[in-house]
Image (cartoon, coloured by chain):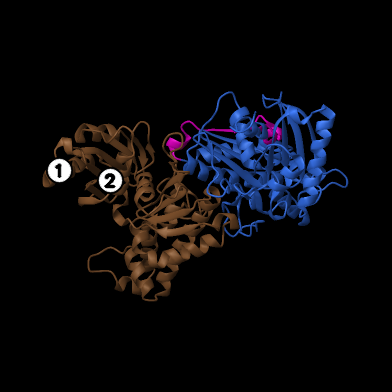
Chain colours: A brown, B blue
């Protein structure tokens, strides 16, 4: 009887593979650094090996597997299964579904990672389904998956949900997409790290630097640690990122009137104690009373496994799967 | 046999009432200036009188009328039929559906004017249905109605589509909603008029002033006329509004991946020759290739009657109507 789901989360910095049961629980998983940006074929081979290792470790045969769910960075042409132009992975028009299907076999369902995460949150994030839900990831980039009345917003070609490329700081930092001042360019983990490094380059940011281990790069994490220690420079960095996230989320709340906004991703999870209050305050003060009346803004409870959980949700809720 | 639809478009500056046939064609309509901002009861009485006059003029009896569709300014609590806080009409928690139902009688369907307009565009705007459609009105304010995969985006409480309150100019002009730099505050007809008046107050804008009739206020229209005559100051005003509209629409295109963005409303219709090329250029240069691949940005062909057409669409496509 087929009762396991293979889940794959391919990201700009890591590949995460897992085996899940019918309840969306991760039974076993493995994580590796994404092997080479700009070389999709190498990443696909890495993924194939990781999945094979998991199947071997759990003794899974083809008949045990209900299906495989995969999340990849966007923008993704959803119908064609082609990653159009990932700024993070530097893939260009790469037919990821076809290449993965060849190697992993069986029924394969694939979507943009943030959409998969939104499904994960929808099905497993809380004890009831929030039919109007925005999931936002803050990590290397900023991305979103949006559920409108219980349905995932794909748009015409699957490009729906690219909220990281909303301009919140016109004329601001250059974004990977080419625009300036995108939410991603000023509020991602990468952006916080860039600002922290810029401080240090100007001979400031001593408290941030004091938190950096020997030989380690300065990241958003160290800025967060310094902020928790009361460092004003670090607090200002975090405050700025939180302000931009709040502004962007307020825009989205006015546009979508969701019941719930859920944050996840490495930087949001790592800095949640600092970021969440700033974001909540900014949003509540900048949306219509109708829109804030029933609104919740929370962190995901699913942590790093949110895309894996979403993979299970995709497979389990696909009418063609589960046979 | 019931074959006529009563349509009502209540706006900040005008009330438009019409009688339409089953093909969404306006058979007769009347237009008046909205009688008093801040006094909803007076506007409702005005509307009742206008509808009665139309029915009398066409000799319509109760049995001839399939239903009544109404568009009102948002944010509107859609389930409850209550206008929460209209910045333009200055209505606060006004139970508009109940009050109109009492007076107009019969089956009454009501939604936010921009949502109604989006339905109008969806059903009657072109010779096929664009299932991923964003309608944007630029008039006194800036508003939107968004159709996602053939369904109107209402969100949890009916507040979906408030795109005019996306911040595109942080720290910019104060908006009626309380924020600064909202799209509405920098790119509406009101905003263009305000900037034109500010120019004139600084002793500039002679060409704009030359287009103003005696005793008339300076509006976006005169700025447009001066721009068409080659006036650089006026061109700069229009260019700025177009740039902000383009930036906001680019954000929306990345978020929704629509097939079509349609513009309407007094200012957009009146300035379309100037604004549309600026907007198209700005959007095409600021969205992902996946998102611009099949994208069209056009003016509505329905002109000022778009909300009336949408009222007919609401009534005709409501399963409970038409009996």
- Asked whether residue A176 appears in the rendered view, the answer is yes
Instruction: Classify mark 1: helix, strand or loop.
Output: helix
What residue did someone put label 2 on? A10
Query: The residue marked by circle 1 belongs to what chain?
Result: A
Q: Around disc 2, counting alpha carbons within 10 Å, would you say few (fewer than 14), some (14 to 19), or many (20 or more)?
A: many
Vertical side of A135 occupied by B57: above or below: above
Residue A36, given in percent of the width and then of the height, sits at 24, 46
Q: Quadrant of the N terminus of chain B?
A: top right
Residue bounds of the magenta highlight:
B288-309
Numbered disc in front, either 2 or 1 = 1
At 78% from the left edge and 42% from the top edge, which residue is drawn? B47
Spatial separation of the CA atoms under disc 2 and disc 1: 18 Å
| Residue A194 position in % (x across, y down) | 37, 60
Let me know if residue B218 appears in the view.
no
Whether the magenta-drawn stretch holds residue B293 is answered as yes
Say which element carries label 2: strand
Along the line of sight, which residue is nearer the eye, A52 or B278? A52
Residue A139 colored in magenta in the image: no
Q: Earlier in the sequence, mark 2 or mark 1?
A: 2
Q: Indicate which disc residue A55 carries.
A: 1
Classify residue B66 as left or right of residue A99: right
Q: Which mark, by number, is residue A244?
A: none
Closest to the observer, B49 or B72: B49
Callout 1 environment at 10 Å: few (<14), some (14 to 19), or many (20+)? some
Q: In this rendering, would B262 be left or right of A113?
A: right
Locate residue A237: give its quadrant: bottom left
């Amino acid at each position: 009887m087929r009762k396991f789901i293979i889940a794959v989360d391919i990201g700009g910095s890591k590949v995460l593979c897992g085996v899940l049961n019918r309840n969306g629980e991760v039974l076993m998983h493995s994580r590796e650094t994404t092997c080479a940006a700009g070389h999709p074929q190498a990443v696909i081979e890495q993924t194939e090996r990781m999945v094979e290792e998991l199947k071997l470790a759990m003794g899974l045969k083809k008949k045990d597997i209900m299906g495989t769910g995969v999340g990849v960075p966007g923008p993704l042409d959803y119908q064609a299964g082609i990653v159009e132009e990932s700024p993070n992975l530097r893939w260009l028009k790469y037919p990821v579904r076809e290449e993965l299907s060849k190697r992993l076999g069986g029924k394969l369902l694939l979507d943009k990672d943030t959409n998969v995460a939104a499904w994960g949150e929808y099905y497993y994030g809380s004890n009831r389904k929030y039919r109007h839900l925005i999931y936002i990831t803050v990590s290397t980039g900023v991305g979103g998956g949006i559920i409108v009345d219980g349905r995932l917003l794909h748009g015409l070609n699957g490009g729906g949900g690219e909220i990281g490329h909303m301009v919140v700081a016109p004329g601001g930092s250059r974004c990977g997409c080419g625009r300036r001042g995108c939410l991603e360019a000023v509020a991602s983990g990468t952006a916080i790290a860039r600002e922290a490094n810029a401080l240090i380059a100007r001979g400031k940011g001593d408290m941030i630097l004091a938190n950096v281990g020997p030989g380690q790069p300065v990241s958003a994490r160290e800025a967060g640690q310094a902020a928790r220690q009361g460092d004003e420079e670090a607090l200002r960095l975090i405050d700025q990122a939180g302000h931009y996230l709040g502004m962007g989320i307020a825009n989205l709340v006015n546009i979508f009137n969701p019941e719930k906004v859920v944050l996840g991703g490495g930087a949001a999870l790592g800095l949640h104690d600092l970021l969440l209050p700033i974001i909540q305050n900014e949003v509540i003060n900048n949306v219509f009373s109708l829109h804030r009346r029933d609104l919740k803004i929370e962190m995901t409870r699913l942590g790093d496994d949110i895309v894996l959980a979403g993979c299970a949700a995709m497979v389990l809720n696909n009418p063609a799967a589960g046979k």
